[in-house]
Image (cartoon, rainbow, N blue to C red):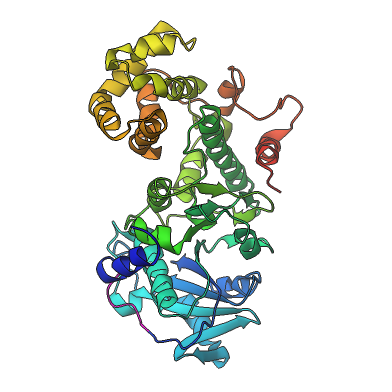
């Protein structure tokens, strides 16, 4: 299903119910940015006035939400009050009440908590992102928004000045684009250090996938993501999950079209403790901070896991003809130790690779088709599952010091003279062309 037809079907069958519909005689906005907010301080509104300009005007959809696991009805009261104080700046665009933030940005408040009550806790931020993007898609279809990108970010993000302009250069075949990011210190030295360490973990994982030549080697942060409207409809929007909604939507989008990895200026994310979601950056940073020595936290997957993944992906063409039982032998031919090769065989057998290969052979007559079918099965989720299985089989996660003592380190450059975690992060960012 492609293009406009996919959008029409999505709006008929999968859009969240009860979203406000309007008729537009002409587009009021070109760009659209969706931002979920829960328990945010009133100064968020001031920060939002700095949303950068793009080609044409921008609609910022602020999705106010609260999970039903939070019994406090006043959780969002301060932000609501701050918005009310700016009611003098309210204007109507085709009957749509929006708050004029600056000369190029209007804010529309989608107050899910007031309209529908608290979100089910198991749907969490995924539902908030989906509702905001669904509304944007609805208004695109009604003629109010002329652009094709559904941009997603978070309340702790500061966007670079060329944020919207950078999307203009993305290949038309791309289903989504991921922006570079960096965490900035907020003054709590322990939290700042733990956050930098966690960011390094994120970079190390994507570097490992890149080393293994995985097609899923990209970051998955909901604060640094843009999706084309047609691809969003094809994958049926954000999954309604309390966390990892960004990972799962990108996993589906990668099967629809390429994921563009953007270079240039980074989105800046605040280093802060947060319990807004059950897992993700905030809870991970809190967990790291429970260590007596933060640098001792075992955060990094063992490089052997990436060596194993690289070997598996290298033998894919041979799997079109070879029996499943030959995987271990083929991995040994990729210079892996026999015990590791046998463990790879066991892990893939447990993942039912035999059935997967049978499907790939039936639907992939050429080598290129076979490999495409294989990567549809061995996707970002199964890649992570594969790495976790090897970790649990004895190649345990490592601290930064332990990782540095091993080869290959999988860093993009020799970091012997780089000082500190932030120096390592900068080394990685330089490798990807980020600033």
Q: Going by the picture, which residue comes out furthest to the top?
A: 338
- Is residue 20 shown in magenta? yes
Looking at the picture, does residue 67 appear above or below residue 282? below
Viewer-closest of 300 and 377: 377
**Numbered disc total:** 0
Viewer-closest of 213 and 122: 213
Q: Does residue 209 show up?
A: yes
Horizontally, residue 384 falls left or right of residue 268, namely: left
Please tell me in which quadrant of the rendered image residue 109 appears: bottom left
Q: Going by the picture, which residue comes out furthest to the front?
A: 366
Horizontally, residue 113 falls left or right of residue 161, namely: left
Horizontally, residue 182 falls left or right of residue 291, namely: right
**Could you tell me which residue is drawn at 32 percent across and 18 percent down?**
321
Q: Assign the N terminus to one quadrant of the image.
A: bottom left
Looking at the picture, does residue 268 appear above or below residue 304? below
Q: Does residue 237 show up?
A: no
Q: Position of residue 371 (x, y in %)?
A: 39, 31
Looking at the picture, does residue 222 appear above or below residue 60? above
Looking at the picture, does residue 248 appear above or below residue 140? above
Please tell me in which quadrant of the rendered image residue 390 appears: top left
**Could you tell me which residue is drawn at 73 percent across and 24 percent down?**
416
Q: Which residues are magenta?
A: 15-21
Viewer-closest of 95 and 254: 254
């Amino acid at each position: 299903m492609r293009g406009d037809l996919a959008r029409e079907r999505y709006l008929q069958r999968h859009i969240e119910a009860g979203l406000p519909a309007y008729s537009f005689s002409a587009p009021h906005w070109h760009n659209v940015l969706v931002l979920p907010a829960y328990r945010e301080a009133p100064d968020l509104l001031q920060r939002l006035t700095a949303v950068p300009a793009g080609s044409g005007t921008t609609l910022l959809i602020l999705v106010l939400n609260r999970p039903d696991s939070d019994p406090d009805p006043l959780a969002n009261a301060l932000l609501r009050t701050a918005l009310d104080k700016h009611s003098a700046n309210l204007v109507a665009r085709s009957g749509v009440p929006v708050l004029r933030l600056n000369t190029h940005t209007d804010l529309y408040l989608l107050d899910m908590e007031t309209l529908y009550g608290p979100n089910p806790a198991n749907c969490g931020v995924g539902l908030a992102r989906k509702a905001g993007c669904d509304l944007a898609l609805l208004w695109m279809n009604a003629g109010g928004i002329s652009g094709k990108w559904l941009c997603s970010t978070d309340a702790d993000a500061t966007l670079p000045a060329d944020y919207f302009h950078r999307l203009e250069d993305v290949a038309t075949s791309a289903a989504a684009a991921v922006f570079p990011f960096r965490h900035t210190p907020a003054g709590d030295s322990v939290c700042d250090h733990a956050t930098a360490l966690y960011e390094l973990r994120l970079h190390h994982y994507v570097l490992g996938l890149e080393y293994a030549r995985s097609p899923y080697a990209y970051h998955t942060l909901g604060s640094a993501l843009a999706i084309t409207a047609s691809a969003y409809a094809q994958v049926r929007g954000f999954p309604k999950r309390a966390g990892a909604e960004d990972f799962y939507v990108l996993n589906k989008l990668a099967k629809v079209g390429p994921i563009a990895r953007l270079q240039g200026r980074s989105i800046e994310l605040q280093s802060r403790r947060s319990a807004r979601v059950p897992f993700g950056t905030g809870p991970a940073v809190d967990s790291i901070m429970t260590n007596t020595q933060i640098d001792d936290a075992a955060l990094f997957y063992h490089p052997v896991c990436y060596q194993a993944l690289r070997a598996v992906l290298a033998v894919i063409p041979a799997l079109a003809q070879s029996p499943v039982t030959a995987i271990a032998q083929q991995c040994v031919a990729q210079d892996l130790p026999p015990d590791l090769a046998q463990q790879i065989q066991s892990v893939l057998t447990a993942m039912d690779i035999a059935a997967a290969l049978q499907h790939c052979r039936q639907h992939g007559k050429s080598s290129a088709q076979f490999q495409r079918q294989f990567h549809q099965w061995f996707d970002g989720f199964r890649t992570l599952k594969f790495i976790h299985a090897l970790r649990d089989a004895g190649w345990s996660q490592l601290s930064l010091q332990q990782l540095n003592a091993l080869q290959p380190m999988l860093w993009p450059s020799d970091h012997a003279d780089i000082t500190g975690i932030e120096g390592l992060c900068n080394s990685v960012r330089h490798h990807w062309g980020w600033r």
